[in-house]
């Protein structure tokens, strides 16, 4: 069957250029890219609407039954008949699972014909998405000198072609925004409610992919002012992804993807404004600038507009006429703050879509980070300090590793580091204002961790809510607003931190009960104090959520520092000792917060690299994790989970995590078992299939490992698929962790030992895993995954 509509099989092209399943030669890649050059440029516009002329011509080329079938197909797809024919041919050639005789049966039966038409429709929608993904690959790697096909991609996206691609992407987006939904009257009787819902999701996915491609283009290619204006109007036209002509078909299942489109479009406009300001095109034409300014003035007060207001203010602040435009940009700044711009951007960056390791995530974090950098250089710190959400946003931007280099290597009197210093002045009175920033920075790894530890050991300033006793007996005012200690002051109970006599302090103007002492201070003293406070609250029954959150943040900071292979300092020793006491106290409560215990366990896992034997002994003494009543259970007892007590974790997974749909403790526990089975492997490689189980380590820690594996095989793996999840990514994390554990157990080389040492713990683990997969619910769960 010859192709008639110039359609290239997009999935095959994507497989080749992405290197997903094959390493094709440059000649093959070059040939395939040239074949698809026009289709890549036109994108979704390559697919044509039906026309009478093509239908009449097509009728003369095929038999009557084929013509009738293809007419039904083209109506269902809403396509030109020649292209509908091409999609049918590609489907039959690449996707149809069956022999030619089976195809004849499909055509002869109306029921099977309906199935075939439905399958081709799904194939067509996937091909549209794969075409956009191919463009995504080009835009992601055409400037990446390390990519094997970079030169080939750069040839397709040559400077002469770039503007055409940009205009094409905008045109495709405009077309999607103006499309009306299909009905049985317009697309045939097959267009049922089910296919209408599938169509809506397909359109939204295409819209998201298009906006992502536009963001990649804006970040790496030439941007013309006229094209940006056209793009901005299109984004505003559908209200940042929230207004569609098919709105009547939208429901709660579409909320997540619409939120992703909104986030992506906000970042797109922010980045485009930065690019236009940097290359000077924003002010090249006064008339065009005024057009954009008028659009900005008309923006409303909805939350998506607040970051745009802020970005517009900042590009004007850095522009050639900043002094003349002072009143204008101040107006936009006021609008941005009224719309809680920084709170909005903080939520945006923390959205799960930006947790992906993808180029668009890098762009989002870098774009907002640059905005903060401009603000610190153009505005007084006193004005920035009082802005709601600015420090949480600072912490969010520093979650991304691309921003570490700029943060640590720039001079300390410029950029985001200024916000770090300013936030530290509120510590520890406003604990998480600063600790969240430290939490993000502590993931910097070995390259910068020593610098961070130096900063944390020498924080300049200590804030506290002053007790009247100290004010009246230990301080004197030597000038208006300036106070000096007359005797040593210990602000943190049971912590070896003393503010020496002669230290000056200044009261906070906004809150006169808080004083900031001009002294050097160590971050981990406050972590120590907060943990002491929480242990005390657990004993008295007055647990405060603020203290719990402070301790969780402290534990995450210490965990990240330990994972960076940093030396444990003297100030860290006491809070690390308290981790075990904290876990012990809260395990005795009826309903302890699982997130807190998860953070404790993560810290213990990090400590395993330093004190493996001691940590395991102390954990086994806690009634925290699943454990054995006695040392040597038989295979039968192991399979039946006899003599195994799930302790706190078993209860919390059922009572808290399954009901809430969040599984921090379970995920931490699975990581802990992996760590015990593979003690010499780096944290990032724990789930790697190449990491081998250490049989000696398993034998030494069998009282912790064996009940963990049994818990996974009996309670977690057979049931995780049916649990509720707030974040669907958790389902994948749990599944992957279980599957990797099973994979490692099945790959154990224990066959030679069966005849002589069948009661050896490693053999029992192997046999229990094998038996569970063959005869128990774990096997059903595995088949369910294989069959999906």
Image (cartoon, rainbow, N blue to C red):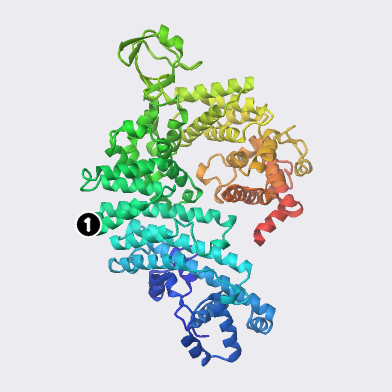
Q: Secondary structure at mark 1?
A: helix
Going by the picture, which residue comes out furthest to the bottom? 60
Query: Observer-nearest residue: 180 or 428?
Result: 180
Q: Position of residue 263 (x, y in %)?
A: 45, 52
Tell me what residue is drawn at x 64 percent, y 81 percent.
103
Coordinates of residue 479 in the picture (x, y in percent): 29, 13
Q: Quadrant of residue 634?
A: top right
Whether residue 671 is visible, yes or no, is yes
300 to the left or right of 577: left
Q: Out of 330 and 166, give the one closest to the viewer.
A: 330
Could you tell me residue 260's position as x and y percent? 49, 54
Identify the image quadrant of the C terminus: bottom right
Check the image and name the residue furthest to the top: 473
In this rendering, is residue 457 above or below 267?
above
Residue 780 relative to residue 391: left or right: right
Q: Is residue 396 above or below residue 508?
A: below
According to the picture, the residue beneath numbered tag 1 turns out to be 286
């Amino acid at each position: 069957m010859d192709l008639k509509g110039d359609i290239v099989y997009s999935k095959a092209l994507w497989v080749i250029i992405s290197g997903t399943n094959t390493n094709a030669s440059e000649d093959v890649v070059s040939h395939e890219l040239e074949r698809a050059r026009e289709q890549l440029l036109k994108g979704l516009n390559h697919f044509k609407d039906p026309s009478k002329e093509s239908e009449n011509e097509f009728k003369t080329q095929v038999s009557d039954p084929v013509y009738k079938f293809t007419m039904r197909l083209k109506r269902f797809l809403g396509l030109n008949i020649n292209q509908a024919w091409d999609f049918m041919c590609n489907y039959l050639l690449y996707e149809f699972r069956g022999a030619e005789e089976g195809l004849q049966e499909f055509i002869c039966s109306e029921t099977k014909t309906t199935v075939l038409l439905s399958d081709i429709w799904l194939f067509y929608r996937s091909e549209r998405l794969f075409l956009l993904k191919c463009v995504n690959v080009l835009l992601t790697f055409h400037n990446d000198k390390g990519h094997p096909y970079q030169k080939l991609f750069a040839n397709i996206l040559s400077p002469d072609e770039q503007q055409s691609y940009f205009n094409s992407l905008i045109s495709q987006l405009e077309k999607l925004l103006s499309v009306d939904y299909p009905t049985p009257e317009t697309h045939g009787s097959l267009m049922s409610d089910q296919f209408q819902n599938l169509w809506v999701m397909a359109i939204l996915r295409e819209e998201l992919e298009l906006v992502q491609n536009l963001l990649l283009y804006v970040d790496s290619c030439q941007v013309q002012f006229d094209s940006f204006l056209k793009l901005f109007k299109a984004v505003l036209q559908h209200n940042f992804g929230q207004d569609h002509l098919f709105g009547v078909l939208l429901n709660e299942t579409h909320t997540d993807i619409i939120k992703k489109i909104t986030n992506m479009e906000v970042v797109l406009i922010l980045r485009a404004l930065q690019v236009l300001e940097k290359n000077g095109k924003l002010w090249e034409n006064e008339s065009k600038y005024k057009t954009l300014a008028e659009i900005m003035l008309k923006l409303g007060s909805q939350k998506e507009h607040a970051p745009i207001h802020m970005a517009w203010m900042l590009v004007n602040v850095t522009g050639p006429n900043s002094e003349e435009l002072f009143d204008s940009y101040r107006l936009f700044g006021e609008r941005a703050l009224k719309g809680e711009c920084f709170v909005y951007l903080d939520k945006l960056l923390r959205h799960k879509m930006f947790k992906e390791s993808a180029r668009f995530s890098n762009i989002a974090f870098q774009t907002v980070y640059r905005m903060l950098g401009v603000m610190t250089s153009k505005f007084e710190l006193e004005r920035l300090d009082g802005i709601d959400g600015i420090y949480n946003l600072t912490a969010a931007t520093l979650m991304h590793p691309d921003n570490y280099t700029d943060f640590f290597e720039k001079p300390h009197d410029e950029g985001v580091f200024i916000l770090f210093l300013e936030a530290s002045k509120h510590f520890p009175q406003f604990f998480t204002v600063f600790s969240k920033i430290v939490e993000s920075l502590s993931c910097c790894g070995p390259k910068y961790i020593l610098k961070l530890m130096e900063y944390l050991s020498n924080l300049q300033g200590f804030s506290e809510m002053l007790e009247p006793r100290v004010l009246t007996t230990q301080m004197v005012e030597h000038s208006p607003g300036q106070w000096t200690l007359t005797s040593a002051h210990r602000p943190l109970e049971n912590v070896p931190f003393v503010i020496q006599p002669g230290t000056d302090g200044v009261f906070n103007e906004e809150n006169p009960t808080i004083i900031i002492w001009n002294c050097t201070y160590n971050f981990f003293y406050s972590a120590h104090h907060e943990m002491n406070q929480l242990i005390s609250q657990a004993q008295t029954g007055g647990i405060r959520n603020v203290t719990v959150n402070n301790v969780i943040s402290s534990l995450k900071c210490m965990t990240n520092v330990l994972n960076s292979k940093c030396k444990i300092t003297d100030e860290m020793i006491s809070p690390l000792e308290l981790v075990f006491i904290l876990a012990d106290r809260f395990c005795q409560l009826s309903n302890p917060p699982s997130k807190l215990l998860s953070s404790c366990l993560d810290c213990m896992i990090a400590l395993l690299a330093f004190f493996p034997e001691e940590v395991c002994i102390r954990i086994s003494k806690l009634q925290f994790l699943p454990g054995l009543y006695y040392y040597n259970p038989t295979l039968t007892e192991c399979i039946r989970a006899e003599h195994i007590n799930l302790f706190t974790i078993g209860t919390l997974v059922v009572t808290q995590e399954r009901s809430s749909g969040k599984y921090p403790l379970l995920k931490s526990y699975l990581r802990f078992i992996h760590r015990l089975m593979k003690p010499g492997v780096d944290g990032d490689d724990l789930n790697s299939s190449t990491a081998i189980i250490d049989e000696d380590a398993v034998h030494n820690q069998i009282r912790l490992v064996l009940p963990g594996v049994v818990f996974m095989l009996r309670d977690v793996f057979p049931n995780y698929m049916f649990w509720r999840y707030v974040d669907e990514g958790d389902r994948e994390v749990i599944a992957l962790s279980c599957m990797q554990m099973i994979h490692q157990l099945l790959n154990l080389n224990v066959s030679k030992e069966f005849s002589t040492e069948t009661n050896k713990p490693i053999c029992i683990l192997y046999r229990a895993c094998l038996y569970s997969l063959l005869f128990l619910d774990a096997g059903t769960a595995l088949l369910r995954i294989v069959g999906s």
